[in-house]
Image (spheres, rainbow, N blue to C red):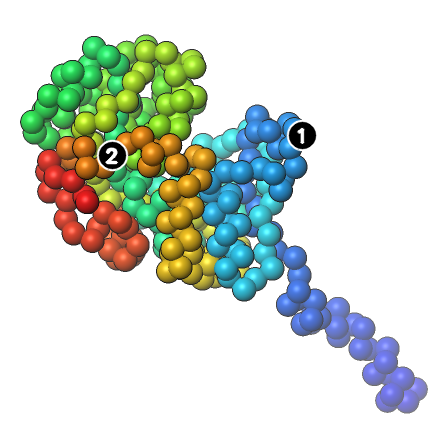
Amino acid sequence: MSITIRLLILLPIVVLFLGNPCIAQTRDINATVPMSLGSAYCKGEISWEDHTEYDVDLLRLALSLSDSDIKVRPSCAEYPTEQRRIAMLQSGDEINVVFFGTNAEREEKLLPVYVPIYMGTTGLRLFMTQPEILHELNDIESLQELKKFTIGQGIGWPDGDTLRLNGFSVTDGRYMTLHKMLNAQRFDLYPRAYWQIVGEWQWMRESAPNIIISDKIALYYPQPIYFFVSPKAPELHKALQIGMERAFDTGLLWDLLQTHPETAPSFQKLNLKDLRIFRIENPLLPEKSVEAMKKYSMFQQRRVPEGDSPQ
């Protein structure tokens, strides 16, 4: 058998073994996010293109700025807890990107995209409470007085540990039940991020009619929320880091934050200048996140002292 014929026979085997570089460069990579079975998309009521959610729309924006062809795709299931999402990301089988608050464990096990998706407004916590508590809350003069109130937090949320380390009494519950627990007086205050509290209150009050928002008192601590990517998807992580940095630098991230249907209600109805803000430290914040907050957070440009406004 001639050398030429042998090469023609062996060539497909070599290509199969080594992989085709052209195919490798153009293979389809999806950013796969968890999607609740109760969502309009998973129930078949709307198309994926019509689904609008802040984190999904921001993923779409960042990827469009990343010079990649990666698209966002959903994975419909019972929406997992944060601890479950960590395990799912580590395996990378069902999903490969989620968003949640950071801590050292998550930054070690997963691939964080070091641009806070809400530009630091997550750490500015306003309170849902009950009418009989509101007057007492609005009259407080010190951080010590604020610590007399019990606080509700989600199971596995990093914020719970931060609050406990700062001397607060914390009651844990599942996210979808916390507003009902507040309504049932299981705790006094349910702190929610500035960007989310009005939008959440609008739907939570349907099943918890007694809860109201305090628009006078707030708590601040640095607690960024990032996109976290599976270690099995480094190409996706690189694309998102590039895209998120460009979204911040161009002002498109700030524009989305102020105008998106999920976040706009707070910017429209809550005046930051009217808030008396009490600050605590976050001793659990990893060093890389400390640096990211200095660069990307609207509240870290200068220290926010007790009782002062960040603006």
Q: How many marks?
A: 2
**For mark 2, what is the residue?**
271
Alpha carbon separation for disc pair 1 and 2: 38 Å
The residue most toward the right is 1
Sooner in the amino-acid sequence: mark 1 or mark 2:
1
Image-quadrant location for residue 192: top left
What residue type is disc 1 on? Gly
Eyeballing the image, is 214 above or below 291?
above
Image-quadrant location for residue 127: top left
Residue 220 location, x and y as percent? 21, 38
Q: Quadrant of the N terminus?
A: bottom right
Tags 1 and 2 in contact by the CB under 8 Å rule? no
Q: Kindly identify the residue that appears in the image at 54 percent across and 42 percent down.
A: 33
- Secondary element type, mark 1: loop
Mark 1 vs mark 2: in front: 2
Residue 229 location, x and y as percent? 47, 51
Q: Quadrant of the C terminus?
A: top left
Q: Kindly identify the residue that appears in the image at 67 percent across and 72 percent down.
A: 21
Q: Kindly identify the residue that appears in the image at 79 percent across and 72 percent down.
A: 13
Which of these two is toward me, 1 or 227? Answer: 227
**For mark 1, what is the residue?**
44
Query: Quick check: 40 left or right of 250?
Result: right
**Label ID, residue 173:** none
Residue 28 location, x and y as percent? 65, 57
Specify few, some or many for label 1: CA neighbours under 10 Å numbering under 14, 14-19, or 20 or more.
few
Residue 237, visible in the rendered structure: no
Which of these two is toward me, 305 or 12? Answer: 305
Q: Kindly identify the residue that appears in the image at 42 percent across and 41 percent down.
A: 259
Query: Quick check: 276 left or right of 66?
Result: left
- Secondary element type, mark 2: loop
